[in-house]
């Protein structure tokens, strides 16, 4: 004699397990009548893309292992302001009797210096020498009119600060 295939039972949430065959034949008031609900058909598994071996994303939401820290209340965090100062080094810059290009440390500009001629030691010695040799009637004052016998002061044309001095002696 061939055995009958087992009966399929569907399990519904919230109901007790189904009665056995003998209990179902007799009247048993402890089990309420169960409405028949067929089990939902399982969804077909999505096929993997053959171009890439990455499986599709799961349908449930992503839950990180460590949640991000809560936002802090109060003052926002700001990075400190860093100021950068550029230092210009002028190696071998020689101030002479002609204007030169230099960097002014006061106004931070590259400028061509403005010259100012002042009476220095060479002008006074020239005046004294001319007076000794007989130029006492005003001719000894000629060195104070000649710029090539005077000292030279180099100024910044923007802020008038002194950048350098050229002394004749």
Image (cartoon, rainbow, N blue to C red):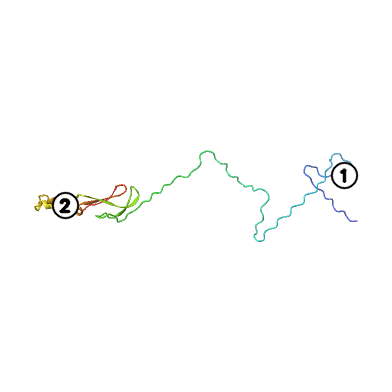
**Label 1 packing within 10 angstroms: few (<14), some (14-19), many (20+):** few
Q: Is residue 65 left or right of residue 4?
A: left
Residue at position x 34%, y 50% from top?
Answer: 109
54 relative to 71, above or below:
below
Front residue of 8/129: it is: 129
Q: CA distance from mark 2 to mark 1?
A: 139 Å
Front residue of 33/31: it is: 33
Q: Is residue 83 left or right of residue 5?
A: left
What residue is pinned by disc 1? Answer: 24
Location of residue 28 in the rendering, given as x and y in whole percent from the top left corner: 87, 40
Q: Does residue 143 appear in the picture of this structure?
A: yes
Q: Is residue 4 left or right of residue 54?
A: right
Query: Residue farthest to the right?
Result: 1
What residue is pinned by disc 2? Answer: 143
Q: Are marks 2 and 1 in contact (CB under 8 Å)?
A: no
**Element at label 1:** helix
Residue at position x 87%, y 46% from top?
Answer: 21
Front residue of 6/69: it is: 69
**Label 2 packing within 10 angstroms: few (<14), some (14-19), many (20+):** many
Location of residue 44 in the rendering, given as x and y in whole percent from the top left corner: 73, 54
**Element at label 2:** helix
């Amino acid at each position: 004699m061939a055995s009958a295939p087992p009966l399929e039972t569907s399990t519904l949430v919230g109901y007790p397990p189904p009665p056995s065959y003998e209990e179902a034949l007799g009247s048993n008031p402890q089990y309420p009548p169960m409405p028949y609900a067929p089990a939902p058909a399982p969804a077909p598994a999505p096929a993997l893309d053959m171009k890439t071996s990455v499986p599709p994303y799961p349908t449930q939401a992503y839950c990180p292992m460590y949640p991000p820290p809560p936002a802090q209340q109060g003052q926002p965090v700001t990075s400190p302001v860093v100021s950068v100062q550029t230092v210009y080094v002028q190696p071998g810059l020689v101030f002479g009797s002609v204007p030169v290009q230099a960097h002014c440390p006061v106004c931070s500009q590259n400028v061509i210096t403005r010259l100012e001629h002042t009476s220095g030691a060479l002008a006074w010695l020239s005046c004294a020498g001319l007076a000794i040799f007989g130029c006492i009637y005003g001719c000894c004052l000629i060195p104070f009119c000649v710029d090539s016998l005077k000292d030279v002061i180099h100024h910044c044309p923007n802020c008038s600060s002194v950048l350098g001095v050229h002394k004749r002696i």
